[in-house]
């Protein structure tokens, strides 16, 4: 009996040892599955934060949305087609008002130095994510008050009547009315799913604002550290639910505002991907033997927004005069250096429902003066013209563009004083409506026309990305009509009619659509140009 007991004990010891070894091997294998490669991305600026719901710019989204987080549904890499994300599938009721999402099992939240999850992703995380934006009295929102510009700009705060947990892996959204772009909208950055367990901990610790500095998600990369204006460091996520998409162990953002310095770093292999090359640097990049410089037509538009709440800019005649006085052809040649085309509509030609019959006003200084006089400004007036401090695909050199417009407007008696601020401050003040005329632009977010007409010009967006502060009911009604039907022909008719109204009223002056270039090292594999304006590193590897 004693010998049998020893034998059983020995066997148990061997089994336990084998289990431990297997466990260690599995953990090592999971980590070993990520190639020991480092990729450095020369980005153009510092993100304002890491809470995707409160931002609207590509620099923020690249640094948080497509590294740390996932959404219920997601855009395919390199395109605008929506595919399953944290939801494996979804059902839509026959009346189009109820969307039921069936959630993916086995998805893990990231383990970081500041949070260790005790459970996997489930319906509670979806409820927290959306109820924080829906409910002004939500405890977390009261502890950390902030704005959700995309959510409100698209009217989702009014559209979604409730989000319910059917069971731990099923969530139901109920809408007030049919909304054709709803699924496309849910794939956008603001809808990145947060950990309810992590936010509960932050709330209990009195550190709710840390959600914007120390992000936790389910995405391909784990946030490690951020040094403002210097670096952001990420590690590949060994537990990512799409393990084959994590191909680098270290991802570093080297924040490099100077485009010329970014080019030199690329040539010296100090970074392997860069953002926003200047048009004048394209030939240099193409000549570098270690680099590739792919390009494609940009899904973007650069424009001058007129704050219609300002007395001098409230008249359509004044805005048309200012538009007519801008030599857009010269701007395309000098600012875009030929890598763009003149814009006429409030969306790019690659967007379905674009009105091909819409023609921009001809450059005509004499007629512009006549319109100003008709509007009561025979001697012109003085305004501020804000120039972005950063480079964007839709505007590669805002300072030069501002100077050219300033010279054009001077010819009709309008004195423009050029103003600029640090990017975060620029946007904050612009949202508050401090500007007169503002250089800004847009890269489409989801492939739907509503993302241009509603988000940039709708009444719901006046406190958000509608920098013209223009709320015009005939226009807004047409955009609403396009939103509440799934009939593509009816939607197209509504949107083309809306574009005609835009052309009459000109709340902003369309300037140009640019060509987008994405310089990469020849050592990089799997990189795609994202038409929606951000940069993604899931699926990207290094030789």
Image: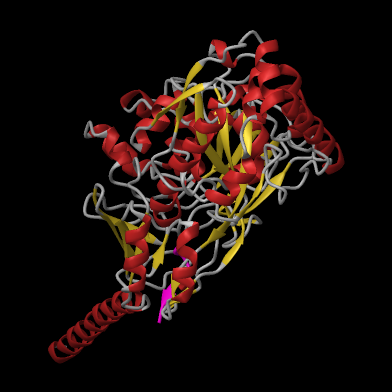
Quadrant location of the C terminus in the rendered image? bottom left
Give the mark count: 0
**Observer-nearest residue: 451 or 299?**
299
Does the magenta-highlighted stretch encompass residue 25? no
Question: Range of the magenta residues?
Answer: 537-543
Q: Is residue 540 magenta?
A: yes
The image shows residue 142 at horizontal and vertical percentages of 35, 23
Residue at left offset 43%, top offset 42%? 52
- Position in image of residue 108 (x %, y %): 40, 58
Relative to residue 356, is residue 314 drawn left or right? left
Q: Is residue 158 left or right of residue 41?
A: right
Please provide percent x and percent y for residue 66: 45, 55
Q: Is residue 120 above or below residue 96?
A: below
Which is the main secondary structure of the residues drawn in magenta?
loop
Q: Give the quarter of the figure containing the N terminus.
A: bottom left
Relative side of 305 to 239, left or right: right
Q: Residue at x 48, y 49 (%)?
A: 396
Between 478 and 425, the one nearer to me in the picture: 425
Give above or below for 59 relative to 55.
below
């Amino acid at each position: 009996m004693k010998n049998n007991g020893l034998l059983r004990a020995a066997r148990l010891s061997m089994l336990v040892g084998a289990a431990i070894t297997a466990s260690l091997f599995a953990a090592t294998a999971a980590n070993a599955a990520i190639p020991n490669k480092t990729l450095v991305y020369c980005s153009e600026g510092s993100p304002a934060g890491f809470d995707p719901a409160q931002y609207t710019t590509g620099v923020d989204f690249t640094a948080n949305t497509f590294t740390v987080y996932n959404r219920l549904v997601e855009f395919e890499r390199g395109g605008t087609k929506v595919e399953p994300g944290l939801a494996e599938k979804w059902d839509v009721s026959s009346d189009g008002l109820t969307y039921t999402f069936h959630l993916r099992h086995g998805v893990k939240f990231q383990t970081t130095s500041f949070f260790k999850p005790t459970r996997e992703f489930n319906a509670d995380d979806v409820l927290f994510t959306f109820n924080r934006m829906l409910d002004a009295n939500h405890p977390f929102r009261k502890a950390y008050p902030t704005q959700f510009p995309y959510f409100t700009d698209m009217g989702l705060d009014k559209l979604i009547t409730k989000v319910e947990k059917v069971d731990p892996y099923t969530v139901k959204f109920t809408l007030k009315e049919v909304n054709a772009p709803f699924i496309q909208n849910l794939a956008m950055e603001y809808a990145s799913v947060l950990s309810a367990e992590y936010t509960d901990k932050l709330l209990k610790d009195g550190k709710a604002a840390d959600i914007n500095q120390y992000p936790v998600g389910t995405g391909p990369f784990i946030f490690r550290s951020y040094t403002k204006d210097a670096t952001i460091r990420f590690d590949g996520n060994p537990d990512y639910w799409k393990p084959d998409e994590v191909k680098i162990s270290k991802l570093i953002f080297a924040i490099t505002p100077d485009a010329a310095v970014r080019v030199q770093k690329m040539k010296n292999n100090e970074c392997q991907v860069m953002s926003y090359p200047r048009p004048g640097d394209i030939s240099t990049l193409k000549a570098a033997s270690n680099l590739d410089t792919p390009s494609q037509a940009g899904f973007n538009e650069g424009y001058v927004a007129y704050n219609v709440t300002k007395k001098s800019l409230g008249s359509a005649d004044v805005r048309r005069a200012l538009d007519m006085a801008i030599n857009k052809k010269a701007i395309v040649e000098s600012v875009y250096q030929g890598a763009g085309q003149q814009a006429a509509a409030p969306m790019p030609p690659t967007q379905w429902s674009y009105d091909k019959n819409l023609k921009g006003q001809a450059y005509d200084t004499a007629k512009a003066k006549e319109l100003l006089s008709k509007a009561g400004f025979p001697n012109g007036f003085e305004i501020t013209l804000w120039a972005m401090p950063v480079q964007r695909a839709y505007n590669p050199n805002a300072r030069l563009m501002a100077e050219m417009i300033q010279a054009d407007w001077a010819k009709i008696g309008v004195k423009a004083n050029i103003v600029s601020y640090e990017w975060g401050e620029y946007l904050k003040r612009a949202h508050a409506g401090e500007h007169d005329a503002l250089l800004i632009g847009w890269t489409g977010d989801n492939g739907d026309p509503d993302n241009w007409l509603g988000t940039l010009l709708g009444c719901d967006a006046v406190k958000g990305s509608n920098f013209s502060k223009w709320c015009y009911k005939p226009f807004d009604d047409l955009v609403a009509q396009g939103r509440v039907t799934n009939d593509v022909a009816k939607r197209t008719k509504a949107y083309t009619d809306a574009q005609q109204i835009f052309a009459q009223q000109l709340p902003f002056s369309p300037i140009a659509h640019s060509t987008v270039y994405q310089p990469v090292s020849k050592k990089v594999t799997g990189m795609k140009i994202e038409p929606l304006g951000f940069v993604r590193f899931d699926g990207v590897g290094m030789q």
